[in-house]
Amino acid sequence: MFFKLYDDVNDFSRDVKDVLLRDEAQNFIPLGNIMLGCAGLDKTGWRDPANWLMATVSDGSKVRLTAIMTPPHSLTLYAAGNVFSDAELVCLINGIKETSYQVGGINTNEALAVRFAEIYCGSCGASYKIDEKLRTYELTEVNPDIRPAGLLRPARDSDLSFLPFWIEGFGRDCFGGLGAPVADEGRYRYEIEYSNRYIYEHMGTPVSMARAHREMVNACGVGGVYTPPYFRGKGYATACVAAVSRMVLGRGFKSCVLNADLANPTSNGIYQKIGYKPVCDAASISFKTL
């Protein structure tokens, strides 16, 4: 097995893009990140490829494992054909250990994530915890029975009166954040200008939001779905995600892809109602040094 570390995202893309596209929906996070990095239009925060860990493990002729980490986010792996061996993982882990990168966690296909965590923690005296189990869904056609309940529009400057509370509320619900806006107007203006964030209005009142992000070759990711508590239970999230999904398909993408927390039956039910079909399950795992 051969470990290769990359310092140029374009070189990395040339070696792994076709491999990742074999399971495009499953790989929408690494693919979206690679395409963003190659475009080079946004290097804000974690988006600068100069700070990324990019690596492959090959058998001499074919790439068997791809790895990408965009600090401070977790490592994302893909095993070609979703088939992997301990020898390939050991090669990857040993290679990463020779770098200056610190791997705080992994977010990828569940079987691969767990086995990587077992070998990694066993080799460096750490422990691991499964923080979240996720299901990846893909949609090629929106359920025609989902009727619009309002109007979808891009986020705009005037939304700064409420959008910071929604963004932090999403972070609290999904990642355990405090839920309170920070004193950083630039952070929220960035979300409006660059994050492809959409607001759903009912009778002129903003009631829900979602994002169209991580554009790939055939698919585009959908995420950041949030409805404030006082508007929940009225079908607004369903209408919002359906509207964003229709918009994405209308732009020429063949499918929409998203992740859902398996511990949240409400969101999983909403997505399936809209027309999203399960693709695979993933796990988000964190590591802790003993």
Image (cartoon, rainbow, N blue to C red):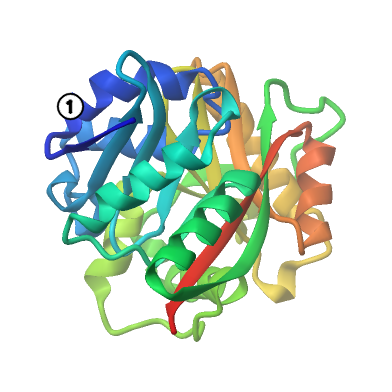
Q: Which residue is mark 1?
A: 10
Q: Residue at x 17, y 49 (%)?
A: 48
Q: Secondary structure at mark 1?
A: helix
Rendering coords of residue 162 (x, y %): 48, 72
Left-right relation of 175 to 16:
right
Q: Quadrant of residue 266?
A: bottom right
Foreground pick, 246 / 114: 114
Rendering coords of residue 81 (x, y %): 56, 22
Q: Is residue 21 above or below residue 41?
A: above
> Which kind of residue does numbered mark 1 sit on?
Asn
Q: Is residue 132 above or below residue 79?
A: below
Foreground pick, 163 / 218: 218
> Does the image show residue 221?
yes
Q: How many marks?
A: 1
Q: Is residue 21 above or below residue 86?
A: above
- Label 1 crowding class (10 Å Cα cut-off): few <14, some 14-19, many 20+? some
Q: Residue at x 41, y 33 (%)?
A: 65
